[in-house]
Image: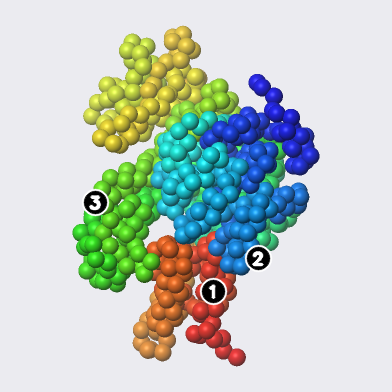
Amino acid sequence: MASAPPALDSLLRSTFGHERFRPYQRDVCQAVGGGNDVLLVMPTGAGKSLCYQLPGLARDGVTLVVSPLIALMEDQVPKLQALGLRADRIHSGRSRDDSRQVCFAYLHGELDYLYIAPERLAVPGFPEMLAKRTPALVAVDEAHCISQWGHDFRPEYRRLGERIPMLRPAPVIGLTATATPLVQDDIVEQLGLADCTRFIHGFRRENIAIEIVEAPPSIRGEKTRELLQEPNLRPAIVYCGSRKNAEDLAAELKNDFPAAPYHAGMASDDRDLVQDGFLNGRFEVIVATIAFGMGIDKPDIRTIIHTALPGTLEGYYQEIGRAGRDGEPSRAVLMYSWADRRTHEFFWDRDYPDTSHLQRLWNLLDREPQTNEQLQARMAAGDLVFERALEKLWIHGGAVVDPDQRVRRGHDHWHLDYGRQREHRRAQLDLIARYAESPVCRMLGLLEHFGDLEDARRACGICDICASDDTLLQRFRKPSSEQLRRLRQIMTALRKHGRQTSGRLHRALVEDDEVSRNDFEDLVSALARAGLVRSIEDSFDKAGSVIRFRWIELTPGGFRHEGSLEGIVTLPAPLPKKTPARKKAAKKKKESRKAKAASRADRSKTAADSVEAVEPDEAQPDAALLKALKDWRLQEARRRRIPAFRILHDGVLVEIARSKPRSQADLLAIHGFGPTLAAKYGLKLLALVTERDPPMT
C-alpha cells in the first residue's frame, strides 16, 4: 500500500493532534487529497469527519460541508476553531446578520471550513454566491438522505445534485454510516460521482456477540431484568418500542440497579442529566426508545438489549454499534415476535398510504393552483390521510406547492417512484424479520447487507448461530424422533440433488402442510448451527420488485456426516413463562389498571352530566390560537420556500392549540414533536401560546 503524502502525515500530527491514521482513513484521505470523487461508507465512530477535514485543509482552500444535522455543525465548528482553524456555519438557527457575515468571510477567503444546511442551496442567489469562490472540496455528510431508498430520505437533499456542477472542479466526497449497495448506487447517481472511488468497509465488530430470541412481549421486561442482574453485563442500553414502555421498564429496573429512561418526550435538561449520569457512571442502565438516536459515545457499554424488533437493519446496526467501543467483549440481545412486525406494518400503512389515496388527490389537481382547504374539502378525507397524500405527491413530483402554499398538478408518472419507495419501505420490514429468523452468522448477515468491500466473509464465531452453547437467553433442546426423521430427510435431499432453495425443499419434503414453513426453517437453522448446512441469501427482480430467497446446501462437514444426528443437532427451547411471583405481580398490576380505567370512566360520566366539567384531553382546540399557529407556519414556510406541512403537520398544531403548552417539556410531550423541532421552533411556539393565553397571576 502506498504511503500517505508527507503533507497529510504532517497535518495529521501538527493540526489534528493524531499520531496515526485509524483503519482505512489513510487511503480515503489520499484519494480525496488527490482530487478524486469518493463515496465513503463507514460506521459511526470510525472517523469519517477526518476524511474530509484533513484532505480539505491539505488542498489549501475552503471545504464546503453540506449537512442536515444542526447539532453536528454546532459540535464540529467549535472543535475545529479550538484547533486554530477558521470554521463557521450557516443554518436556520442563526440570525440573518450572522449568516451574512459568514458569507462575507467565505468570499474573502477567510474560512477553512463552511458548514451549511442543504436547504440553503434552495435559497435564490446562494449557490451562485458559493460559485464565486470555488471550494477546494465539497463534502456531503449523511449522504443517504439524498436517496429515496435511504432510511432518512429528505426531499430537499435530492436537489443537491443540481447544485454540485456549479461548484466544480472541486472533488466531492459523500459520507454516510449506513448505506446498502442499492443506496450507494443512488448516492453516486444523484451526486454525479460517475468515476468515484468507493470505500465501504469497517462494519465488522469482532467483539459483539449477537443473540436473537423469539419472546412474547409479556415476558421481555422480566427477561431484561434477569439478564442485567449480572454485573458484567452493565453498563447497558435497553431499547423499547414506545416512550411509555421505556418509562415503565426503567421504573421497574431501578429497583435493582441505577436506571433511567431517555426519550424524545423528556425536557432537554432532563435528557442532559440522564446522559451525563450515564457517562459518569451514576446510571448503569439507560432505557431508550428505538426511534430516538441517543448520540452517546460511552466506550464501556457492555450490553445492548432490544425489547422490540427494530424497523430496519440499518437502525439495528447503529444501535448495537454503541456497545464495546473499548474493544472488550460485549453483547447484543434482541427479543422479537410476530406482534412486532404487525406494529411496524401499522406505521408503514400510516406513513405510506395506499396509492389510491394519492391518485384521488392527483385527480383533483389541475394547472390552476388551489388552497389546501379547497382540496381537502373536495377530497373529503381526514387531516392525516390528506396531509400524508399531499406530502408524498409533492415529494414524488405529482404536486407542486407555490410560495403562497397553493397546490397545482405536477407530472403524471409520480406513481412509479412512489410505488417503488413504498414497496422498498415494506421490504425493509421483510429484511429485518428475515435477519431475525436466518440461520446465517449474525455478523456475516450484517456485512452482506452493507456490502463491506474489504471483509473476508468469515463467520464471527461468537453469535448465537456460531456459538449456541454460549447464549444468554436462548436455551436448546433435543429434537423429537419425528424431527430427527425430518432432519435426515433434508440431509438426504441435499446430498442427492445439491443446492436447493428453502421454499422448494419445503414443498418437496412436506405434504399437506404437516410441517409449517416456519417450523421447517427452524429445522434448517438447527442443521446450520451444527455446521452441516449453509444458507446463502439471494434475490431476483420480478416486475420491478426484488424477490428475496435463500439457498440451502450441505457443508463439507455435512457431506462427510453419515451417522446419527442425535446429540449433534438441537432446536430452540421456548422461553420459560412468568414465575408464580411475577404472575402475581402482573395480576396486581392488571387489577390496578382496571381500577384506574373504571375511575376514568366514572369521571367521564360525571363530565357528560355537566357542561362545566370537561377533561383537559377532551377540550376543543383554541380556535384563535390555532389560526395564529397556522399563520405563523405559513410565514415560516414562505420564508424557507417549502410546503407548510414540512414545517409542522396540522395534527401537531391542533394539539398545541388544545393543550396550550407552557414549557419545552410540554411541547415534547406532544406526539410528533421531537427535540429537533423544539430547537428550531420551540421558543416561538411557546411565545404564540403565551400571547393568546397569558398565565394567570
Residue 269 badge: 2
Q: Residue at x 49, y 39 (%)?
A: 179
Q: CA distance from mark 2 to mark 3?
A: 48 Å
What is the x, y in percent for residue 538? Answer: 38, 27
With respect to residue 217, does 209 lie above or below? Answer: above
User: Disc 1 on helix, strand or loop?
Assistant: helix
Given residues 372 and 246, the one toward you in this image is 372
User: Disc 3 on helix, strand or loop?
Assistant: loop
Q: Is residue 696 visible?
A: yes
Residue type highlighted by circle 2: Asp
Q: Residue at x 31, y 46 (%)?
A: 417
Residue type highlighted by circle 3: Asp
Badge 2 crowding class, 10 Å Cα cut-off, few under 14, some 14 to 19, many 20 or more, is few
Residue 412 badge: 3
The answer to whether residue 455 is left or right of residue 642 is: right
With respect to residue 250, does 601 lie above or below? Answer: below
Given residues 383 and 408, the one toward you in this image is 408
Residue of label 1: 684
Given residues 265 and 1, the one toward you in this image is 1
Q: Quadrant of the C terminus?
A: bottom right
Q: Is residue 183 visible?
A: no
Q: Residue at x 27, y 66 (%)?
A: 369
Q: Upstream in the sequence, badge 3 or badge 1?
A: 3
